Image: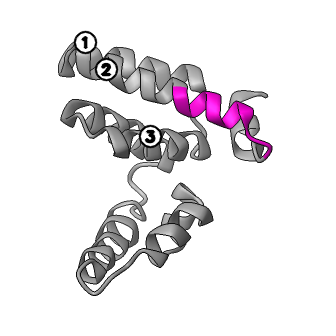
């Protein structure tokens, strides 16, 4: 759970945990143990590198809700807004322009939300704001 909190932030993890139902408990346990306890905790790639790979994968799959969450995570993991935009541009070559354009639009919405929020500590550290 520590890696999940470090990457996604307490607010996201607390909301996901609070929303657990008997029907979703096994799925949330799977995500926490396998994705965050196993894969994201491995040392072969940094969290920053994992964020790049994750964003590219999500763009390719057209997973818009997950893109929003992982743009925030990428900023938390040290990517700048310019680097995230570059990931979207590079991914356009392989996933297609429509998918990357949609993802870039989502990223810009997240950047604007963070710029407008009063709690921009993570964003400011990574964006220079």
Left or right: 108 with respect to 96?
right
Q: Nearer the viewer, residue 60 or 63?
A: 63
Alpha carbon separation for disc pair 3 and 2: 13 Å
Secondary-structure class at tag 1:
helix
Report which residue position mark 2 lands on: 100
Residue 103 seen by the camera:
yes
**Magenta span main SS:** helix
Judge from the rendering whether residue 64 lies leftward or rightward of residue 111; answer left or right.
left
Disc 3 from disc 1: Cα separation: 18 Å
Q: Position of residue 93 (x, y in %)?
A: 23, 13
Label 2 and label 1: CA atoms lie apart by 5 Å
Q: Coloring scheme of the render?
A: one colour
* Residue pointed to by mark 1: 97
Residue 87 appears anywhere in the view: no
Which residue range is magenta in the image? 109-118
How many residues crowd around disc 3 within 10 Å: few (fewer than 14), some, or many (20 or more)? many
Quadrant assignment, res 114: top right
* SS category of the residue bearing label 3: helix
Residue 53 drawn at (x, y percent):
34, 39
Indicate which disc, 3 or 2, sits on the residue closer to the N terminus: 3
Q: In which quarter of the image is residue 5?
A: bottom right
Marks 2 & 1, CB-CB < 8 Å contact: yes
Residue neighbourhood size for the residue with mark 2, other residues' Cα within 10 Å, grouped as few (<14), some (14–19), many (≥20): many
71 lies left or right of 80 = left
Where 41 falls versus 84 (above or below)? below
Whether the magenta-drawn stretch holds residue 114 is answered as yes
Give the image location of residue 28, x and y in percent.
32, 75
Residues 13 and 53: in front is: 13
């Amino acid at each position: 759970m520590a890696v999940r909190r470090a990457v996604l932030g307490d607010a996201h993890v607390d909301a996901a945990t609070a929303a657990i139902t008997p029907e979703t408990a096994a799925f949330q346990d799977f995500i926490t143990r396998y994705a965050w306890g196993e894969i994201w905790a491995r040392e072969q790639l940094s969290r920053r590198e994992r964020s790049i790979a994750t964003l590219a994968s999500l763009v390719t799959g057209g997973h818009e809700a997950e893109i929003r969450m992982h743009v925030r995570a990428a900023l938390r993991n040290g990517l700048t807004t310019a680097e995230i935009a570059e990931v979207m541009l590079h991914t356009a070559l392989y996933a297609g322009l429509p998918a990357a354009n949609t993802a870039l639009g989502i990223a810009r919405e997240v950047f604007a939300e963070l710029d407008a929020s009063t709690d921009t500590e993570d964003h400011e550290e990574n964006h220079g704001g």
